[in-house]
Image (spheres, rainbow, N blue to C red):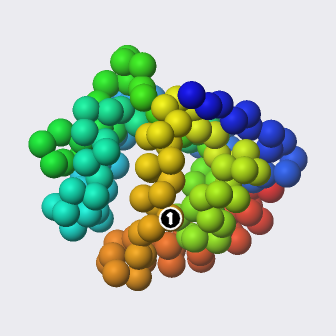
Amino acid sequence: MFNTAMTDSPDKVPLFPRPLSLPLAAIPSRVHGTVVVTVLNRVFASALRDGEMDYLQGRTVRIHIRDMQLTFCITLQQGRLVASRTKNMPDLSITGTLHAFLLLAARCEDTDTLFFQRRLQMEGDTELGLEVKNFLDGLDVDALWLPRHISSMAQKALPLYERTFS
């Protein structure tokens, strides 16, 4: 098991404004999870089909975007990602700010940098955490339509986000 503490101070990292996060936090986490897994099932269709994500079978990963007050859990069932209940203790939790997740999506920072600088925090099953990290590192974003466009959008949005919320 491992636990890396977040050390980013609010004056160093742009944070999503709390008043804007309140309406998002009012939406049940199962709704957020359902939207996310719908997108991820399309994005990772070939990886799911090829069994590259089988390590998630029956395991729960909780994603928490701290400054947006969003939390959702995902697991793999019958070859598809599904939203799972947040009441259960997850096998792995990944926590960070929207900024850190944007850096990851835009491929502006690699996973090692984000975790070692403690901009993203992983807590829970070490082996599962390494499998998730290795899967993300091994993604060929250029071969996947949606991640390529998400990466492009994140790269364009990142400077605006940093200027606006710093």
- In the image, 133 versus 87, the foreground residue is 133
Tell me the quarter of the picture where residue 146 sits.
Answer: bottom left
- Give the residue drawn at x 41%, y 82%: 142
Kind of residue at badge 1: Asp
Please provide percent x and percent y for residue 137.
50, 64
The answer to whether residue 11 is visible is: yes
Q: Residue furthest front?
A: 127
Task: Work out which quarter of the rendered image holds the N terminus and state it.
Answer: top right
Q: Which residue is mark 1?
A: 137
- Give the residue drawn at x 42%, y 19%: 89
Tell me the quarter of the picture where residue 99 sits.
Answer: bottom right
Please provide percent x and percent y for residue 121.
64, 40
- Give the residue drawn at x 74%, y 37%: 6
Q: Residue furthest left?
A: 78
Secondary structure, mark 1, is helix
Give the left or right position of residue 39, taking residue 123 as reference: left
- Give the residue drawn at x 58%, y 71%: 107
The answer to whether residue 157 is visible is: no
